[in-house]
Amino acid sequence: MELYEKTLEQTYVHRGKILNLRVDKAELPNGSECVREVVEHTGGVTIAALTSENELLFVKQYRYPYSEVVLELPAGKLERGEDPFKAGMRELKEEVGATAAKYVDLGRFYPSPGYCGEVIYLYGATELTFSEQCLDNDEFLEVEKIPLMKAVEMVLNNEIPDGKTQTAVLKMAMRVWYASNSD
């Protein structure tokens, strides 16, 4: 059986600044029709920036949908057609005032593939240099440094609920572990 669904019809219910919502009619592999609700999002980027003291740079910010302050790695929304790597470098500078001499691609993250087309690109950054933050006018956050292994413990103890942050923390920790144990 071919695992493919053919789009028959698309109807946009909402077109917004951050996302679009559409309701599609699709044909399933067995020929039946179904309805799919799809959130279109331009995507995002997250940076696991590791200091020379083996600390990750985090930001705390109020997240309106959850009505709480969330601890996250620096991250941001991509503009349509924007290069994810360049966006990551921009977000690192804006949110924590850092630039990096070395970057590593940590892969892609699908936050909710059942209904959302968002892709979040993950990067690691090392050999950091610090200057001033360049926050957007509507951006209010606090920077926090957390030792890498403490951040891993926090992920494992459910103290960091943000999925993109969990994934990037664990991937960065594994890269560091493999690098130190590859002899």
Image: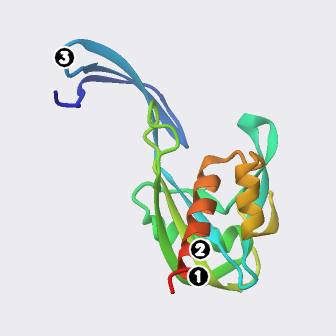
Q: Amino acid at mark 1?
A: Ser
The type of residue carrying mark 3 is: Asn
In which quadrant is the N terminus drawn? top left
Q: Which mark is residue 30?
A: 3
Q: Residue at x 61, y 47 (%)?
A: 163
Q: Is residue 171 left or right of residue 39?
A: right
Q: Is residue 157 left or right of residue 14?
A: right
> Label 2: few (<14), some or many (≥20) within 10 Å?
few
Mark seen at residue 50: none
Q: Is residue 97 above or below residue 164?
A: below
Q: Nearer the viewer, mark 3 or mark 2?
A: 2
The residue labelled by disc 2 is 177
C-alpha span from label 3 to label 1: 50 Å
Indicate the position of residue 108 as horizontal and vertical percent values. 45, 56
Q: Are marks 2 and 1 in contact (CB under 8 Å)?
A: yes
Secondary element at image label 2: helix
Element assignment for label 1: helix
As rendered, which of 87 and 105 lies closer to the eye?
Answer: 105
Please name the residue shown 76% across and 83% down the image.
53
